[in-house]
Image (cartoon, rainbow, N blue to C red):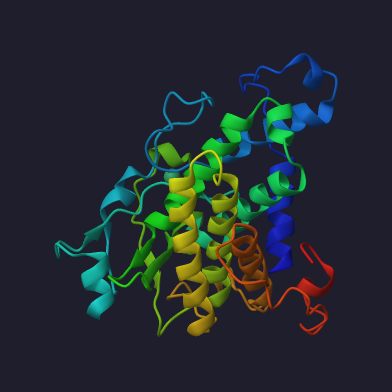
Amino acid sequence: MKLTKKIAAAAASAVMAVNSIPMASFNAAAADHNYMEALAMSLYFFDSNACGKGITDGPLTWRGDCHTYDGEASVGSLDGSAKSIVDPDGDGKVDVSGGWHDAGDHIKFNLTIGFALSSLGISDYLNPGIYEKANCRDHFEYEMRWGADYLMKTTFLDDSGKVAAVAHTIADGGTDHSFWTAPEVQTYDRPIFWLTASDNNSSVSCEMAAGLGAAAYVFKDSDPEYSAKCAKYAKALLEFGTKHVGNNTGGIGGFYSTDAQYQDEEAIAQAWLWIVGEGDKPTRVPKNKDYGGSQYDGWVYS
Ligand SMILES: [Zn+2]
């Protein structure tokens, strides 16, 4: 994943300060510490970017359901055995509603959704009890589930549990950017961009695996069944990304280049699965400096 995009996402998060957001209730201890308030408020960034149904009447008064027609998106160019798994009734439509918009526009990228989920999970893992202390554990788990639900919904497994196809991007970047309007009023055509074994993107697949591995960690105690489901998808996506190595985009072109190496995403995914007892000790993590001075060696999560 490109560092520039990660910085852009962080910057977008930093400017998300809107006075009309209803204040969460803070306990007395949290009220004494601005970092606790900042942590609790930061979760509303995810509500502001939510897509699909179940948004109207939520905590953000200016947001509502949007792009609900993603629930009947065209299967498009997908064919062969993958199409029969994605579209078993053959009506040419598939439900890819939900998830989060990309920062600042209304495309949905599983690369950034996976990164967001993994980052949220890391904040919980490195700071045990912090969301309880900030009195927002429920909100935190709500966002983790919202993201994980979408990553699993857009991952299509065959009967043996292997990934057959991933709807990794929804909406064309150029088209989306021509409509600078609220998502709730948009009706433009939103195509699906697919990943398959023969046309894969290992950065995207492994980042999705990392995000779902993080969700498996977060829900390990509070919802073991859901945690196990997340781990199952994470393992399938990690295998998919590392067995069918590619840097393709399923037709979206260079709009969202992932020309950095995928091994950083692979390493984080391995680490999460190891943490939740669903994988071997990571083989990539100890090999720092193996990646040609790339961001994995010295930047972001190293
Ligand atoms: Zn939307």
Is 141 on the left or on the right of 229, as rendered?
right
Residue 186 visible in image: yes
Ligand 1 appears in which quadrant? top left
Residue in the foreground of this view, choosing between 107 and 189 = 107
Residue in the foreground of this view, choosing between 218 and 123 = 218
Q: Residue at x 48, y 39 (%)?
A: 182
Residue 302 at x, y percent in the picture: 79, 67
Residue 273 at x, y percent in the picture: 59, 63
Which image quadrant: the N terminus?
bottom right
Residue 80 at x, y percent in the picture: 23, 80
Is 149 on the left or on the right of 18, as rendered?
left
Residue 260 at x, y percent in the picture: 68, 77
Q: Residue at x 45, y 62 (%)?
A: 233
| Looking at the image, residue 153 lies above or below residue 68 | below
Quarter-wise, where is residue 277 in the image? bottom right
| Looking at the image, residue 95 lies above or below residue 78 | above
Residue 17 visible in image: no
Residue in the foreground of this view, choosing between 272 and 16 = 272
